[in-house]
Amino acid sequence: MGISFLILQQQTFIIKSQLIISITSLSLFTSKFRFIFLMFYFKLPSFLRFDDQLNEMVLLYRRTRVFYEAGKRVIFMFVAFNVFLCIFYMIGLYSVASNYNSWLTNSGNFGIILDRPLHEIYFFGFYFSLGTVSTTMGYGDISPMNIIECSW
């Protein structure tokens, strides 16, 4: 019983370590954007534990707890806007590569956005995500131009 348990324990350890190595290597070498998802996946449990610890620390202080919860919601919305704009930008790049009309190549109110520096593209994408996520319809300045962008 003891030896078979140790062998089983060693096999599960080897399988887990090999699984982690294979997932890491596959995700790092299949796409240039996949490592971002991998880093987020491995950091999420530590962030949740840290949040639980901070919640316990501010539990007795009402005003501090209110500020902490409000700050947490603002940070969550900022992260949500950034995720939305990054996905919309990647969809736009895919559309340009597939020779579809895209929000990046449309000469609308802001001109062709793809020709601008990266920080301006980020600003326009954040502007679109803020308007779309917070008001559910946006303002129409930047709008999806093909079926792939519309489905997002």
Image: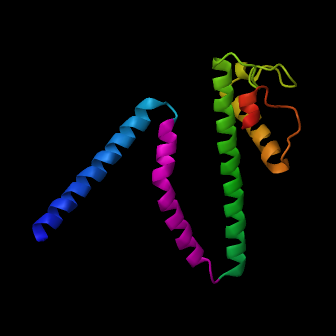
* Coordinates of residue 121 in the picture (x, y in percent): 71, 29
* Coordinates of residue 110 in the picture (x, y in percent): 84, 25
Q: Is residue 81 left or right of residue 107?
A: left
Reply yes or no: does residue 48 show up in magenta.
yes
> Where, quadrant-wise, is the C terminus in this rendering?
top right
Residue 31 can be seen in this image: yes
The span shown in magenta is 34-60
Q: Is residue 15 left or right of residue 150?
A: left
- Looking at the image, which is closer to me, 74 or 98? 98
Residue 120 can be seen in this image: no
Reply yes or no: does residue 12 show up in magenta.
no
> Where, quadrant-wise, is the N terminus in this rendering?
bottom left
Tell me the residue at 75%/28% (across/down).
Answer: 147
Instruction: Please name the predominant secondary structure of the magenta segment in the image.
Output: helix
* Coordinates of residue 130 in the picture (x, y in percent): 78, 45
Q: Is residue 41 left or right of residue 122?
A: left
Tell me the residue at 61%/77% (across/down).
Answer: 58
- In this rendering, is residue 95 above or below 82? above
